[in-house]
Image (cartoon, rainbow, N blue to C red):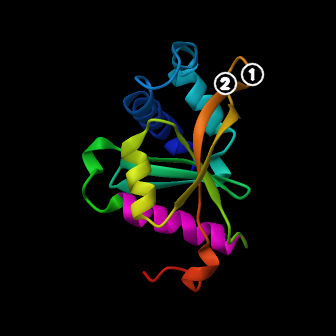
């Protein structure tokens, strides 16, 4: 991801978050999820974020933070195209390249569509926990499903 991708990727994240989370998250958190907040958070993570684009249109992205697949979003227009599967494989490859074989991700409790996708991709739900999530007003505690995956069992980087 580059700085020139920031505005479009933040807009994708903002729309995707509200699509997946507005109905299942507390209104206090939803109110803090503004386009400006997504832009600010993503701007601080440009070096850890990767985009998938078709021409000039960004159709998905992921962000890594240490051993966590911190964010993962695909535009509605790309759902069902196979992009999500390719993008999560790219994220896993990037984690492996960084020496991380036991990554984790947080999926908001109730985000069943995402949960089904992660499970289909081989991620395993290991527990439900309360996690402080980042907001412009400071941490907000949210219940999440924690998913983990043993990448060492896959024998290394995914085939192209």
Q: Is residue 12 above or below residue 152?
A: above
Q: Is residue 74 visible?
A: no
x, y percent for residue 19? 37, 30
Label ID, residue 135: 2
x, y percent for residue 123? 51, 62
Q: Is residue 108 above or below residue 138?
A: below
Label ID, residue 41: none
Reply yes or no: does residue 97 show up in magenta.
yes
Between 26 and 58, the one lying in front of the other is: 26
Q: Residue at x 48, y 68 (%)?
A: 89
Local crowd size for mark 1, using a 10 Å CA cut-off: few (<14), some (14–19), many (≥20)? few
Q: Residue at x 47, y 62 (%)?
A: 88
Residue range corresponding to the magenta coloring: 84-98
Report the side of 133 relative to 13 (left or right). Answer: right
Reply yes or no: does residue 109 show up in magenta.
no
Q: What secondary structure prevails in the magenta region?
A: helix
Secondary structure under the numbered disc 1 in the rendered image: loop
Between 112 and 100, the one lying in front of the other is: 112
Label ID, residue 138: 1
Between 39 and 24, the one lying in front of the other is: 24
Contact flag, marks 2 and 1 (Cβ < 8 Å) = yes
Report the side of 80 relative to 141 (left or right). Answer: left
x, y percent for residue 80? 25, 55
Local crowd size for mark 2, using a 10 Å CA cut-off: few (<14), some (14–19), many (≥20)? some
């Amino acid at each position: 991801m580059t700085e020139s991708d920031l505005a479009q990727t933040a807009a994708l994240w903002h729309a995707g978050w509200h699509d997946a989370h507005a109905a299942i998250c507390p209104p206090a958190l939803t109110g803090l999820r503004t386009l400006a907040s997504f832009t600010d958070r993503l701007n601080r993570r440009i070096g850890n974020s990767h985009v998938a684009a078709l021409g000039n249109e960004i159709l998905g992205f992921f962000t890594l933070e240490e051993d966590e697949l911190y964010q993962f979003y695909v535009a509605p227009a790309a759902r069902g195209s196979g992009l999500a599967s390719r993008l999560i494989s790219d994220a896993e490859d990037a984690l492996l390249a960084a020496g991380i074989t036991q990554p984790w991700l947080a999926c908001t409790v109730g985000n069943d569509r995402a949960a089904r996708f992660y499970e289909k991709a081989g991620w395993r739900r290991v527990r439900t926990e309360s996690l402080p999530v980042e907001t412009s007003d400071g941490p907000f505690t949210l219940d999440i499903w924690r998913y983990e995956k043993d990448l060492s069992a896959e024998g290394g980087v995914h085939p192209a």
